[in-house]
Amino acid sequence: MTGLCRDCLCEVLTPSGCCPGCGSARVVRHPGLALLDIAHIDCDAFYASVEKRDNPSLRDRPLIVGHPGGRGVATTACYIARRFGARSAMPMFKCLELCPEAVVIPPDMAKYKAVSAQVRAIMLEATHRLEPLSLDEAYLDLSEGEHRFARPPAVSLATIARRVEREIGITVSIGLSSNRFLAKLASDMNKPQGFTVIDEAEAPALLAPMPVKRLHGVGAATERRLAELGLHTIGDLQGRPEADLLARFGKIGRALHAHAWGRGGRTISPDRETKSISAETTFERDLSRLPDLARALGPLSERVARALTRNALAGATVVLKLKTHDFRILTRHARLGDPTARAEVIAGAARRLLERETDGRRFRLIGVGMADLRPGSEADPPDLFARSPPTARDAPAGKETGDGGSESPQRTASTASTSGM
């Protein structure tokens, strides 16, 4: 199979043109179509697509999902809004400056989780080797799926896309390759409703002109460091020996070299372990005083504690996250004497960390999280006997970056999306 009609699912043998069977122009062609079996599926503008599905009057209008006004950020911008420059994670005021005609709808997480579960159920009919990354995306390993020998993986993927559109009313984009890195890259190349295939042989030439920020793990800080070395494109990276990148960047350098040449891992982990649970909030205005900042710790700690309890987990390390007025991220950690799932213990340790950071700087965001997760059975007991809460022992201070997030490969699950797709 070198060609597949995405509408009638027939094999297409002609080298170009529409499907001879149904006349559809939605034909995907690639020499490795029948052989490649690692896929990444990403729902197109997921939250916005669900809202448009449920309110057809919004279909042709720019739509942004997020909390309107104040210091909110856009959760999702539909493709019409993106034409004006609005983007996910952009401050809402900026989105509305770029697209003043946009309709703004607050997110409905319960609804999105329900739709995510429907999409996941369809995927699981093709393979149980499914690794959710969030509510709207997942990796699939179709090398040993139930229908592997009855039909090629590409047919299973096209079937998933068709069923999601017909049964659920939203669309997805698909990337198919031989490894995770290329599959995810491919799914993002022709959105929305894309079906892109890349094999490792063609990857180096395809990747070479792309900016280095297209590589997984390259945030703003790493991009700046690479630029200082004259490395602006992936092709520039291809010209550097692995040993040189390893010496300059450590293990990240090895990953940069591998990805620059289109190499990556194939392992799909259906039961991938959650590494942390967190919650955060953006203030209506920048805050600098300890009492004002600390007021958010209780509610955030309650959210984290509920998520820990819901997932039968406890954490041994409290994480405090702060974002300064100029968008720099600070993370600080405190190791506890015992793992906990208790909000008051989490809040107490977070406050002690916060006290050391309130030196007059202004902050726009605060977050609380738990890392080093353990089974809930290992958690400290309630204060039945007036037991003193564990004392926080400070771990080494976390990094301060300007990336807006960590470049660590570990998974971080927020309280809004712990369950995933």
Image: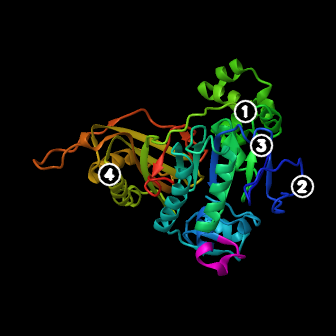
Q: Which residue is mark 2?
A: 17
Q: Mark 3 or 1, which is nearer the eye? A: 3
Q: Is residue 18 magenta?
A: no
Q: Are marks 3 and 1 in contact (CB under 8 Å)?
A: no
Q: What range of the chain is rendered magenta?
A: 53-63
Q: Is residue 60 magenta?
A: yes
Q: Which residue is mark 3?
A: 1
Local packing at callout 2 (Cα closer than 10 Å; few below 14, some 14-19, many 20+) is few
Local packing at callout 3 (Cα closer than 10 Å; few below 14, some 14-19, many 20+) is some
Residue at disc 3, secondary structure:
loop
First of labels 1, 4 by sequence position: 1
Foreground residue, 249 or 59?
59
Q: CA distance from mark 2 to mark 4?
A: 62 Å
Tell me the kind of residue under disc 3: Met
Q: Which mark is residue 347?
A: 4
Q: CA distance from mark 4 to mark 3?
A: 58 Å
Q: Residue at point 78% right, 28% down?
A: 238
Local packing at callout 1 (Cα closer than 10 Å; few below 14, some 14-19, many 20+) is many
Q: CA distance from mark 3 to mark 1?
A: 23 Å
Tell me the kind of residue under disc 2: Gly
First of labels 3, 1 by sequence position: 3
Residue at disc 4, secondary structure:
helix
Indicate left or right for 150 with 241 as reference. Answer: left
Q: Residue at point 52% right, 60% down?
A: 116
Q: Residue at point 80% right, 43% down?
A: 2
Q: Mark 4 or 3, which is nearer the eye? A: 3
Q: Which residue is mark 1?
A: 262
* x then y, percent, for residue 284: 51, 66
